[in-house]
Amino acid sequence: MSPALDEAALRAVLARPRLTRVLAALEAPGEETRLVGGAVRDALLGRRVEDIDLATTLLPEEVVARARATGLKPVPTGIAHGTVTVVAEGEPFEVTTLREDIETDGRHAVVRFGRDFAQDAARRDFTINALSATPDGRIHDTVGGLADLAAGRVRFIGEARQRIREDYLRVLRFFRFHARYGAGAPDAEGLSAAIAARDGLALLSRERVRGELLKLLVARGAPAVVAVLSQTGLLQRLTGGVGDLGRLARLAAAEPAPDPVRRLAALTVRSAADAERLRETLRLSKAEHARLLLYAGAEAALHGALAPLTEPDIRRLVALHGPVAAADAALVLEGEPRPVLTREAGGLLARFAAGEERVPVLPVTGAALVAAGAPPGRGLGQGLAAARHAWLTEGCPTDAAARQRLTALALAAAGGPARGTSDDTARSQSSHDN
């Protein structure tokens, strides 16, 4: 075995007390249960192992019975497909009965339960995902996964085009796994098969595409793999637009931790229209869509700034688009000619991003204007709009003098008495600052 693979780390995973308890519960004469898939793969690479999957010759009903008999909690999360989640002291372990494919249509597979680990391994997608290990640490590899793992090679099991036809999501998984585990160029046969199967992507739900793409974007090799997607035309099929490969690469090198939505923004968002397109194309969540919309506004404001930005400019930016979008856009644009921030402005933006500064809020409220004598109705909205416009123009001040000045302006625009500079009015606004 290649010295790059860490058998000691795999044995350490197998020795975890909760896992050994589950394995002991499933031990029975003539039956076998193994650690499979990603847990074996990541342990051998010395990476952190969190989700642990087990494969067993036991039928699901037997898994449930044995778990209960030993004080474990069985949850039938996918029992129709052979999967039972066994919970040991709060930690979940997915236990799946060995399966054999009967029929596939490119999206779903019809399976039956089996007893052959080699057959179960053969139905998986990539060789590096088909490894298994017995409780004593013996590794089983029937498809060449160990050599591929050591070489940083993501390779389909069997004939690549056939494996993709079984489930077109494997096109995206091929690129995602190469971005995370691959070295050098993608496997030539897999790449050719993925390109040939591009029309099959239309058969996938947009939610499944979104999930794979966001996972791909945070992988170690995402910039290089996204460049391949762009060169082959697959990126345009996935996002409905072209990608800014330079921005993605610069962001990946600069950001403190990978963030999938921020990387998606860097790659594909230049305007609110881009955010709207992605909402439909990828079935984004409401929170993801809202974040991209705010990012689009912040990006446009920063990228369009011809003069160096000062602290009032940053307060205005944060008031309009929020601290997350402002920080995202500034990080994405780092290394480009614009924007240029003064040292003080950069420090203020960093404090906003860290939550050390409160987001500026217009120090005039409708209730306070009514209390000061403004007539309720349409004029009140006009007064608030006038105050907000002036407030943004001034760089979002919130001191007492600004509050009085803006209140007087709002009252005048609302058609009410200009009492905004009086001490009474100032006191009526004081609750806004507290």
Image (cartoon, rainbow, N blue to C red):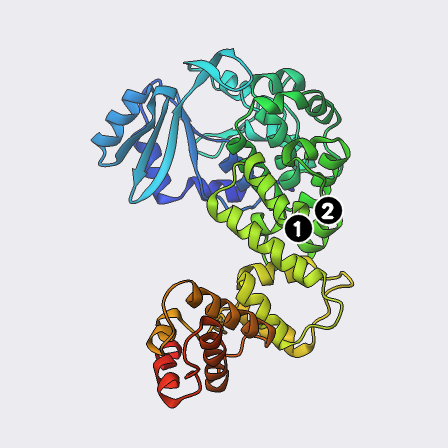
Q: Do the residues labelled 1 and 2 touch (CB within 8 Å)?
A: yes
Q: In which quarter of the image is the N terminus?
A: top right
Q: Residue at x 71, y 35 (%)?
A: 229
Residue 352 numbered mark, or none: none
Point out the tag, 1 or 2, that comes first from the N-terminus. 2
Task: Looking at this view, name the residue that lies furthest to the top.
Answer: 102
Q: Which amino acid, mark 2?
A: Asp
**In this orientation, which residue lies closer to the viewer: 104 or 113?**
104
What percent of the width, then of the height, locates residue 305?
72, 66
Q: Which amino acid, mark 1?
A: Ala
**Disc 2 secondary structure class:** loop
Badge 2, how many Cα within 10 Å: few under 14, some, many 20+?
Answer: some
421 sits left or right of 79 in the view: right
**In this orientation, which residue lies closer to the viewer: 420 or 17?**
420
Residue 2 visible from this viewpoint: no
**Disc 1 secondary structure class:** helix
Judge whether 393 appears above or below 242 on screen: below
What percent of the width, then of the height, locates residue 391?
54, 74
Judge whether 290 appears above or below 150 on screen: below
Q: In which quarter of the image is the C terminus?
A: bottom left
Badge 1, how many Cα within 10 Å: few under 14, some, many 20+?
Answer: many
Judge whether 27 appears above or below 324 on screen: above
Return the residue at label 1.
266
What percent of the width, then of the height, locates residue 420?
43, 83
Judge whether 33 appears above or below 258 on screen: above
Return the residue at label 2.
244
**In this orientation, which residue lies closer to the viewer: 43 or 222?**
222
Residue 178 visible from this viewpoint: yes
3D distance between C-alphas at marks 1 and 2: 7 Å
Numbered label tally:
2
What percent of the width, then of the height, locates residue 276?
58, 42
